[in-house]
């Protein structure tokens, strides 16, 4: 499965844009963009939106490749409802494939 950084690199290379050139257009460092492409760091929503616009894709397309859990939302929901935390701990013991079936999806983002 392709991750966020790999997808960004693929789109950038398809447009024949160098990493440094894209970083300059985004007003971010080439080192940061390199780390994003290598999966070492993740861009903010604002930067991810800017990347998407420069690569002529919808921001939602790139968001589909972001595999990080929504930590802040999970924390907020667990504080608001302790049963959510209990349910989450139970769900975390199932396989990723079974979890995807549970939410009604066959697999993660489609590879292009």
Image (cartoon, rainbow, N blue to C red):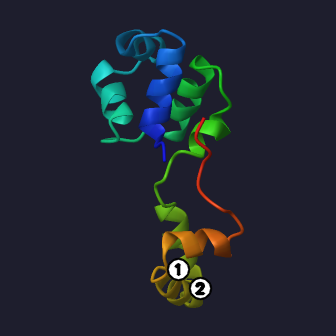
Residue contact between numbered discs 1 and 2, judged by CB atoms under 8 Å? yes
In the figure, 8 relative to 66: above or below?
above
Residue 54, image x, y percentages: 58, 18
- In the rendered structure, the answer to whether residue 7 lies left or right of residue 18 reads right
Quarter of the image holding residue 24?
A: top left
- The label on residue 78 is 1
Residue extending farthest to the right is 104
Q: Residues within 10 Å of mark 1 (few under 14, many from 20)?
A: some
Q: Quadrant of the C terminus?
A: top right
Residue 89, image x, y percentages: 47, 85
In the figure, 45 relative to 15: above or below?
below
Q: Residues within 10 Å of mark 2 (few under 14, many from 20)?
A: few
Q: Secondary structure at mark 2?
A: loop
Q: Give the residue drawn at x 32%, y 35%.
A: 38
The residue wearing badge 2 is 81
Quarter of the image holding residue 59?
A: top right
In the figure, 82 relative to 6: above or below?
below
Quarter of the image holding residue 106?
A: bottom right
Q: Give the residue drawn at x 59%, y 27%.
A: 52
- In the rendered structure, the answer to whether residue 108 lies left or right of residue 21 reads right
Q: Secondary structure at mark 1?
A: helix
In the figure, 40 relative to 77: above or below?
above
Residue 64, image x, y percentages: 60, 46
Q: Give the residue drawn at x 50%, y 33%.
A: 7
Between the C-alphas of marks 1 and 2, the distance is: 5 Å
Q: How many marks are shown on the rendered structure?
A: 2
- In the rendered structure, the answer to whether residue 32 lies left or right of residue 95 reads left
Q: Give the residue drawn at x 40%, y 17%.
A: 23
């Amino acid at each position: 499965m392709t991750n966020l950084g790999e997808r960004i690199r693929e789109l950038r290379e398809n447009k024949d844009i160098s990493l440094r050139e894209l970083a300059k257009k985004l007003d971010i460092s080439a080192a940061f963009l390199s780390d994003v492409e290598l999966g070492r760091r993740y861009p903010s929503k604002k930067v991810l939106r800017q990347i998407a616009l420069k690569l002529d894709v919808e921001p939602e397309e790139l968001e589909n490749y972001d595999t990080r859990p929504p930590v802040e939302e999970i924390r907020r929901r667990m504080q608001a409802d302790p049963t959510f935390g209990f349910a989450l701990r139970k769900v975390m013991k199932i396989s990723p494939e079974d979890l995807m079936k549970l939410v009604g999806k066959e697999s993660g983002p489609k590879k292009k």
